[in-house]
Image (cartoon, grey):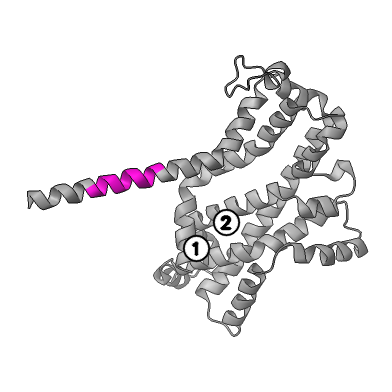
Amino acid sequence: MTTKRGPARLFKWTSRIVLYGAAALVSLAFLAPFIWVLFVSFKSNAEIFQVPITIFPHHIVLDQYDHVMRQMSEFAIYFLNSTIVSVVSLGAVLLLSSLAGYAFGTMAFRGNKFMLGLVLVVLTIPYAVYLIPVFILENHLNLVDTRLGLILPYTALNLPLAIFIMRGTFRNIPHELEDAAQIDGASRLGTWYRVMLPIAAPGVAATGIFTYVMVWSEFMFSRALMLSKNAYTLPVGITFLQSEAQSWNFGILAAAIVLTLLPVLIVFLLLQRFLVKGIMEGALKG
């Protein structure tokens, strides 16, 4: 027994070490660009261009962040536009997807599978296909160069995946809870709001993370639908830093990128404990 357990345990621990080591290398490959940008944002201009190149800053300076937040007034406008568009789009997606997911996941009605199939078909279509039709439609409705002109397509484009996740989340909740609430006199809407929605919190959190990251970092629609600088969001506005400074100032650019990514990192860190559970419940059991 002991002779057999020894090699088995050795193989088990060796496999774990190899697996964790490979995961660490892959994670480092994805994090390396962000870590480099973070270090560059804390360097002075002289240190950024010195030879040989240094990875860690010798002296931490905040001049780049001070320049972005005090001397670049348009950065605050870009940040405000991104915040408003992202928050409103996120709220709309969460509300509509939780209602639709509850209907698809718990109610049996005519056309349920057909409508769900349409949602899945929409998921397979690249976003770029919608760009020209959306631009033509919004141009006729005078929505080009407005925040609402971004909120509407962002909500529509992120809704199919959100519905799919929320449907699976509600399907995973025992039906006895819904039946008990209705026996106590709760309406369908009351059952959804007071009973089902709090239990579906992991799915809501996972949906919120995906939607927020997609909307906050989206470039293509924002660049095509927003024509004036006062309407740009951060992903588009950052590309005009070269015009404002007449040349690429890599320290200022790095600071702007870090400030742009900061809200996404905060949201992810706050909701990461719900992410895996929400995906498992919403996608695998959907």
- The residue segment tinted magenta is 11-21
Q: Are marks 2 and 1 in contact (CB under 8 Å)?
A: yes
Give how far across and how far down residue 155 sits, in percent. 71, 59
Residue 198 appears in the rendering = no
Q: Hey, what amino acid is under mark 2?
A: Thr
Query: Can you identify the residue that label 1 sits on?
Result: 282
| Three-letter residue code for mark 1 | Gly
State the image quarter where residue 49 is shown: top right
Q: Residue furthest left?
A: 1
Residue 229 location (% of width, % of height): 87, 41
Label drawn at residue 207: 2
Question: Judging from the image, what secondary structure is the residue with disc 1 in?
Answer: helix
Q: Position of residue 270 (x, y in %)?
A: 53, 41
Q: Secondary structure at mark 2?
A: helix
For image coordinates 69% across by 47% down, the residue present is 217
The image shows residue 87, relative to residue 34, as above or below, that is below
In the figure, is residue 211 to the left or right of 197?
Answer: right
Compared with 64, 273 (above or below) is: below
